[in-house]
Image (cartoon, rainbow, N blue to C red):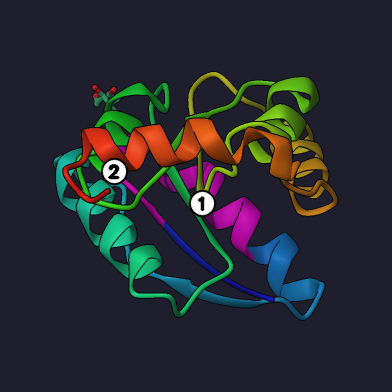
Amino acid sequence: MKIVIGSDHGGYELKEQIKSYLLEKNIQLDDLGTHTKDSVDYPDYGKKVGKAVVSGHYDFGIVLCGTGIGISIAANKVKGVRAALVYDETTARLAREHNNANIIALGGRTTTREKAISIIETFMNSTFEERHQTRLDKIKTIEGNE
Ligand code: RB5
């Protein structure tokens, strides 16, 4: 299992907490920043993580900003990214089962450490249901990828 993670300043603190948890579990993790609490622009980190995920080197990505909204919008502009903003275990499970999300987005100012960990565990323990593939193929068509 290899995960890539990135955030702006609004998601920095939660990113660090998630990182500690995953590293304790011996999960391989690349942190693409930000590395301080200084103000940065979330599109830069959404793009970085999005590109890393579509490169095929990771099982999935995690992006964070204050709400998770801006950075999920940014990551979804990278061709091949299916970033899902998830706030609870149900949306985390469905993001995998129905949407085969390859990135989950979390809000650093809206999600506790405990909830974030539970969301990530739920996502990791869920699997894509093939019956939804036709819809994902249609999303690819929107990207001009067919
Ligand atoms: C930054 O203040 C904040 O706008 C950002 O972290 C995020 O919540 C945007 O969607």
**Please, is residue 58 above or below residue 142 in the view?**
below
Task: Identify residue for label 1.
Answer: 102
The percent coordinates of residue 35 (x first, y second) are: 32, 62
Q: Quadrant of residue 27?
A: bottom right
Badge 1 local density, few (<14 within 10 Å), some, or many (20+)?
A: many
Q: 96 or 92, which lies in front?
A: 96
**Residue drawn 78% across and 21% down?**
90
User: Mark 2 and mark 1 in contact (Cβ < 8 Å)?
Assistant: no
- Magenta region: 6-19
**Residue drawn 71% across and 36% down?**
131
The percent coordinates of residue 59 (x first, y second) are: 58, 68
**Please, is residue 139 above or below residue 45 in the view?**
above
Residue 58 lies in the magenta-colored region: no
Badge 2 local density, few (<14 within 10 Å), some, or many (20+)?
A: many
**Please, is residue 93 above or below residue 17 in the view?**
above
Query: Secondary structure beneath disc 1?
Result: loop
* Residue 53 in view in this figure: yes
**Residue 84 in the figure: left or right of residue 69:** right
**Residue drawn 33% across and 59% down?**
49
Residue 12 lies in the magenta-colored region: yes
**Residue 40 in the figure: left or right of residue 62:** left
**Residue drawn 16% across and 43% down?**
144
Which of the labelled discs sits on residue 4, or is there none? none
Q: CA distance from mark 1 to mark 2?
A: 10 Å
The percent coordinates of residue 65 (x first, y second) are: 37, 34
Label 2 within 8 A of ligand 1 by Cβ = no
Q: Quadrant of residue 11?
A: top left
The percent coordinates of residue 69 (x first, y second) are: 36, 22
